[in-house]
Image (spheres, rainbow, N blue to C red):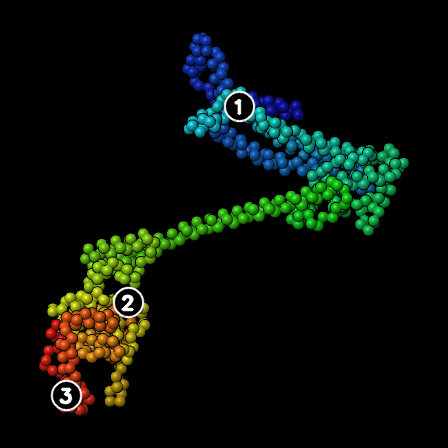
Amino acid sequence: MVMSYQILKKTVSVMSYFCHQQGNGARNNQDIERQFLKNGGGDSVKETTAQKKILDPRKAFLKRWNVGFVLSCVIAVSLDPLFFYLPVINEEKKCIRLDKKLWITAIVLRSFFDIIYLLHIILQFRTGFIDKKLLKSGKSELNKDAWKIARKYLWPWFLFDIITILPIPQVVTPTIFSEMRGTKSSKKVLGAFWYFFSTQRLAACWHEACGQNRSRCVGISFDCDHSIGNLSFINDICSLNTENKTSFDFGIFLKALQSGVLESEDFPQKLFYSFWWGMRNLSSLGQNLETSNYIWENCFALGISIFGLVLFLYFMGNLQMYMQWTATKSVKNWDKVRKKMKSRKRQKQQKIMRSWISQRGFDSTIKSEIMRNIDQRFEEDEDVYVENLIPDLPPDLQNNVKRHLCLNLLKNLKFVKDNGLAAKHEQLLLKICDSLKPKFYKEHCYIVQEGDPIDAVFLITEGTVWTCTSSSNGGKDSQHAERLEKNFFGEELLEWVMKSYSADMYNLSKLPIYSKTLKTHTKVEAFVLMASDLKQIWHSKLSQFGPEELQSQAASRVQRIWRGHRDHPKTDGAVVESKEPSILQRI
């Protein structure tokens, strides 16, 4: 201990010198100090020198020291249980001795860490602090007043540190062993570990046996260094045979006595056997412990159950917090992944949309309006595809897009050309364009089948389709196919609706049928004019004529059909074309 004190003294001197040198300036600063002393400033200089010895807790030295100190405390706490493994039983001689190697190791290690703790206490008197009141006002000045530092540390931390550094295990352990090895019984012996309690209970049994046979225990000591005499009579009372009902009840410590670990100097064997016992009973909350009527044994078993329950609740609480943290982290990570995926998806969609717009040849005005609408929908966290682009555009912009894509195709229809609708009735064609509905079809799928009713006109704006025809020719089937690109299909519906005078045109109860099959070869973009929309447009166009004129046109058509049936019976009532202009020609 003298050597330890000298080491401590030298260490403190070196640290004081280091702190003092850290605050010294150059030689010119010393000259200024001497001049200042001559002028009567000696007291201030002493105070300044004392303040220079105060350490700043924000510096790297104290930060490293605190980390090392915490680690030393953890190791020191883990060393304390070594003192409870010191007793070794000699069952043959009925005596107790200390494991000297373990004793020296525990004393040296504990003293070493106590010295580190003592250095930490000394440093506390030389470590400044930042006043909380000044910190609230935004000032982080270091308080270097030695008296204020000492007063702040003395209560209550200094008292706690002094209690911590007291050599309690070094002093208490020999005292307890001296009581166990004596021939007088002491029931006040307590322990914190199962191994230590097992030794104490065996010693208590020996004391009880001597109490019953005082004449045989005269001059007897349970200290192996002074053990003399024959103590074999103790085996009758302190038997480890559980079938002997008259023997001493060792309770939960019987396993330790039967295992022989109390007689061994193999420290790892004792440590791991005791550790396994503790873990087994903590995990089961002490449910398998069978105690005797010894009060401290029951208190020990009760402590195991309570401590095990506390650890279980602590574990469950931490597990719940960990699961919540994991779930929160997982949600955050998923949100990041989802945002990243959505960003990539949006970039891909924007690329596809820009490509689609550029391929369609829109003018700059329509193009900018479409992109503005797309960006707005992206900001509203909506997905934008080519399939849902046009239907979700504002009505005016939607009509402009349809007219740009389909008006020329509509003007190329044979029926439109033959009747001069492109030149005379452009408003009618614009209304038809506005009624078109965009449709998208996958490759190799049927759009219409031969023989289906013609309920729509198809304007193919992108992609390739095949039209297939099968017809009976002289009893032999002949088939042929036609490839269509940016073309139309089903224009018979226009002729049927616009030239019809019957009521079928108004209720669409009868429709002509497709003479061809329409099948996609690639992905196809088309605009469809439904029969119901065409009927509504045509009906609004006919509303400019009065009912009498419409009835006259209908009567004329009926008369032509009757005459054709009368004059040409082999035509089965085919309509003979009249030179009289039709309603379509008249409007």
Number of numbered discs overlaid on the protein picture = 3
Percent from the top left, x then y, of residue 114? 62, 30
For residue 149, which numbered disc appears in the image? 1
Percent from the top left, x then y, of residue 577? 13, 83
Q: Is 255 or 27 nearer to us in this picture? A: 255
Q: Quadrant of the N terminus?
A: top right
Upstream in sequence: badge 1 or badge 3 = 1
Image position of 56 with respect to 439: above or below: above
The residue labelled by disc 3 is 563
Q: Image point 14% across, 77% down: which residue? A: 548
| Tag 3: amino acid | Arg
How far apart marks 1 and 2 lie (CA) works out to 84 Å
The residue labelled by disc 2 is 439
Q: Image point 23% across, 60% down: which residue? A: 395
Image position of 335 with respect to 21: above or below: below
**Regarding mark 3 in the picture, which secondary structure is present there?**
helix
For residue 232, which numbered disc appears in the image? none
Image position of 173 with respect to 281: above or below: above
Q: Is 487 or 546 nearer to us in this picture? A: 546
How far apart marks 1 and 3 lie (CA) works out to 126 Å
